[in-house]
Image (spheres, rainbow, N blue to C red):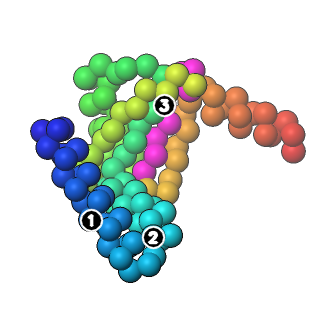
């Protein structure tokens, strides 16, 4: 399925780029990309963790997020980010919940600089 999705994505991208160039507005491509990113992320949750999670850990985080926000989400994406050190960072629409060790250290550092 991934190969088919890649092929279709490439075809769609070529059509969009061709359309923008024909209409003399190729400079609008970054705006189109931004709109596509926003649309694809509208009902997706991105959960960043410093290590790969087991199936039961992913399920637990999904349930916690759903209970916390009272929101039905179309897609959960789990991303490995070793810079977090420990904990999780959750991104949904324009909100970020940073429960990571690195996030706590940044917060502590900022409070010391105030």
Residue at coordinates 30% horizontally, 41% vertically from top-left?
76
* Disc 3, SS: loop
Query: Taking 111 as reference, is 43 above or below it?
Result: below
Q: Position of residue 38 (x, y in %)?
A: 41, 60
In this orientation, which residue lies closer to the viewer: 44 or 97? 44
Looking at the rendering, the stretch of residues picked out in magenta corresponds to 84-92
Query: Taking 26 as reference, is 80 above or below it?
Result: above
Q: For mark 3, does the 10 Å Cα neighbourhood hold few (<14), some (14 to 19), or many (20 or more) residues?
A: many
State how far apart marks 3 and 1 are (Cα). 39 Å
Residue at coordinates 40% horizontally, 42% vertically from top-left?
46
Is residue 70 visible in the rendered image? The answer is: no
In this orientation, which residue lies closer to the viewer: 10 or 47? 10
* Disc 2, SS: helix
In this figure, which residue is indicated by the disc labeled 1?
15
Residue at coordinates 42% horizontally, 60% vertically from top-left?
33
Q: Quadrant of the C terminus?
A: top right
Sequence-first disc among 2 and 3: 2
Is residue 33 visible in the rendered image? The answer is: yes
Along the horizontal axis of the image, is 70 left or right of 81?
left
Query: Is 74 included in the stretch rendered in magenta?
Result: no
State how far apart marks 2 and 3 are (Cα). 39 Å
Q: Which mark is residue 41?
A: none
In this figure, which residue is indicated by the disc labeled 2?
26
Q: Which mark is residue 88?
A: 3
State how far apart marks 2 and 1 are (Cα). 12 Å
Along the horizontal axis of the image, is 26 left or right of 6?
right
Q: Quadrant of the N terminus?
A: top left
Point out the frontmost of discs 3 and 1: 1
Q: Position of residue 52 (x, y in %)?
A: 37, 20
Query: Taking 30 as reference, is 71 above or below it?
Result: above
Sequence-first disc among 2 and 1: 1
Sequence-first disc among 3 and 1: 1
């Amino acid at each position: 399925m991934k190969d088919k999705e890649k092929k279709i994505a490439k075809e769609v991208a070529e059509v969009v780029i061709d359309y923008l160039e024909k209409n003399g507005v190729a400079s609008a491509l970054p705006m189109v990309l931004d709109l596509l990113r926003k649309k694809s992320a509208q009902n997706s949750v991105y959960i960043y963790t410093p290590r790969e999670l087991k199936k039961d850990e992913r399920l637990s985080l999904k349930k916690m997020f759903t209970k916390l926000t009272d929101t039905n989400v179309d897609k959960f994406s789990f991303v490995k980010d070793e810079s977090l050190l420990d904990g999780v960072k959750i991104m949904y629409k324009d909100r970020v919940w940073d429960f990571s060790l690195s996030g706590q250290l940044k917060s502590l550092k900022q409070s010391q600089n105030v």
